Image (cartoon, grey):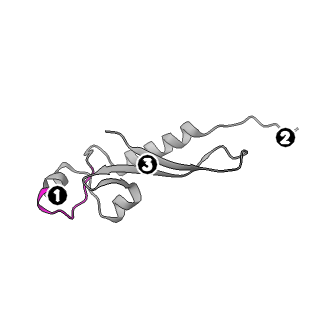
């Protein structure tokens, strides 16, 4: 299962980088931004999905292999894939 990404771009043509990159986590409550997932005390483990069958307030990632580190690595990889480095001479 993959992560969805939302981002913004600057309206300035000189700034080609991406802004405000947000990773989207697929959960038992739908697609949540990672920040919303954390704020709702979301959990990654498989036992979370079992617990959510009895407690409808529990928020679980549908991908139990995800970790906070994997989400951050995916965010950074996305930013790097969208970054264009221009060779600008000052002379």
Q: Which residue matches tag 1?
A: 52
Q: Which mark is residue 72?
A: 3
* Residue 70 position (above or below residue 89): below
- Do the residues bearing badges 1 and 2 touch, measured as CB atoms within 8 Å? no
Q: Which mark is residue 90?
A: 2
Secondary structure at numbered mark 1? helix
Query: Alpha-carbon neighbours of circle 2 within 10 Å: few (<14), some, or many (≥20)?
Result: few
| Residue under the point 18% across and 52% down | 49
Task: Measure the C-alpha gap from mark 2 to mark 3.
Answer: 34 Å
Q: Residue 34 appears in which quarter of the rendering?
A: bottom left
Residue sitting farthest toward the right: 91
Magenta residues (range)? 52-61
- Asked whether, in this view, residue 77 is left or right of residue 36, the answer is right
Q: Position of residue 53 (x, y in %)?
A: 13, 56
Q: Position of residue 24 (x, y in %)?
A: 39, 50
Image quadrant containing the C terminus: top right
The first of marks 3 and 1 along the sequence is: 1
| Residue under the point 25% across and 46% down | 64
Q: Nearer the viewer, residue 10 or 70?
A: 10
The first of marks 1 and 2 along the sequence is: 1
Principal SS element in the magenta part? loop
Task: Measure the C-alpha gap from mark 3 to mark 1.
Answer: 25 Å
| Residue under the point 50% across and 41% down | 78
Task: Measure the C-alpha gap from mark 1 to mark 2.
Answer: 59 Å
Q: Position of residue 23 (x, y in %)?
A: 43, 50
* Residue 29 position (above or below residue 79): below
């Amino acid at each position: 299962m993959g992560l969805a990404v939302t981002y913004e771009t600057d309206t300035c043509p000189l700034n080609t980088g991406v802004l405000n990159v947000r990773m989207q986590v697929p959960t038992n409550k739908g697609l949540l931004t990672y920040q919303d997932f954390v704020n709702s005390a979301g959990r990654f483990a498989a036992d979370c999905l079992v617990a959510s069958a009895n407690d409808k307030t529990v928020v679980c990632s549908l991908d139990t292999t995800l970790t906070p580190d994997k989400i951050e690595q995916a965010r950074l990889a996305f930013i790097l894939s969208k970054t264009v480095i221009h060779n600008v001479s000052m002379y």
